[in-house]
Image (cartoon, rainbow, N blue to C red):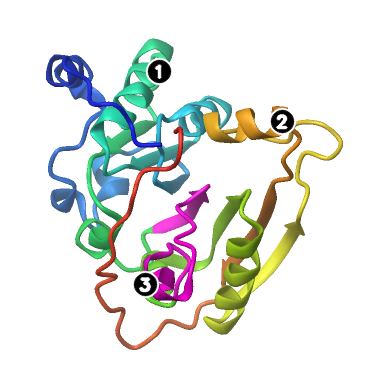
Amino acid sequence: MRMRKKRNLIPRMERCAALLVKEPALHRSRWRSDFPGFQELHLEIGCGRGRFTVEIAKQNPHVFFIAIERVADAMIIGLERAMEEGLTNIRFITQDASNLLEFFGEGELDRIYLNFSDPWPGKRHAKRRLTSERFLPVYKKILRPGGAIHFKTDNNELFEYSLGTFQEAGFALSEITRNLHERGPVGAMTDYEMKFHAQGVSINRCVATFIGERDEAAPDAGAEQTEKVDE
């Protein structure tokens, strides 16, 4: 389901301008100095309507969070949620994930969140998945050694595929579960996650840690990021 266009999007975005980074490339390799006072720098790729990002930012005031989402009609909800909470440790970027190397320097991030990314079913579209071999070298470039990707999905095929690509790319896997909320809700959830958890859908999760061996050259990911269903 595609996000409906919002007729009042522009004035709503303008009211949230304090939390919107319009030129993220200007902060490349400077995020920590440009936004001082935080212990870690985390990125969520494809934040949708921002429930997860806002909740986890509230829980971790010592961490500076950056949320990237290419669909402004979805992201505006997260922007408004963050403004209502008065959060100062979060910024939003309206961009595509294929541009990450323009926005972040080598080893700049401590953590990346991939929550319910588009599964792009079928082998023909596999290269578009955010856990494909086209994106993983980029993550290795911008993560510090010991930094990690926290990955959640309700799509079993995508999860098994991703376990394989993480291992092939040299990430160390841990915290693997195929039923994250089996004994009750765990951690911050996205809107999508809350909906499907209520329906009894099992949620897969793992942590993929970058052990410090970067590829010689991280190629441009060059793949579109699409909005999540119902996010």
Residue sitting nearer the eye, 211 or 199: 199
- Asked which secondary structure carries label 1, the reply is helix
User: What amino acid is labelled 2 in the image?
Assistant: Gln
Residue sitting nearer the eye, 99 or 162: 162
Residue for badge 1: 81
Judge whether residue 81 is colored magenta. no
User: What amino acid is labelled 3 in the image?
Assistant: Lys
Residue for badge 3: 141
Residue for badge 2: 199
Q: Which residues are magenta?
A: 109-132
Counting from the top left corner in percent of width and height, residue 14 is at: 14, 19
Counting from the top left corner in percent of width and height, residue 5 is at: 23, 26
Counting from the top left corner in percent of width and height, residue 198 is at: 71, 27
Residue drawn at (47%, 54%) of the image: 112
Q: Which quarter of the figure is the C terminus placed in? A: top left
Q: Judge left or right: residue 35 versus residue 178.
A: left
In the image, which is nearer the foreground, mark 3 or mark 1?
1
Q: Residue furthest bottom?
A: 216
Q: Judge left or right: residue 154 versus residue 67.
A: right
Residue drawn at (38%, 14%) of the image: 86
Judge whether residue 111 is colored magenta. yes
Q: Judge left or right: residue 116 versus residue 20.
A: right
Label 2 vs 1, first from the N-terminus: 1
- Asked which secondary structure carries label 2, the reply is loop
User: What amino acid is labelled 1 in the image?
Assistant: Arg
Label 3 vs 2, first from the N-terminus: 3
Residue neighbourhood size for the residue with mark 3, other residues' Cα within 10 Å, grouped as few (<14), some (14–19), many (≥20): many
- Asked which secondary structure carries label 3, the reply is helix
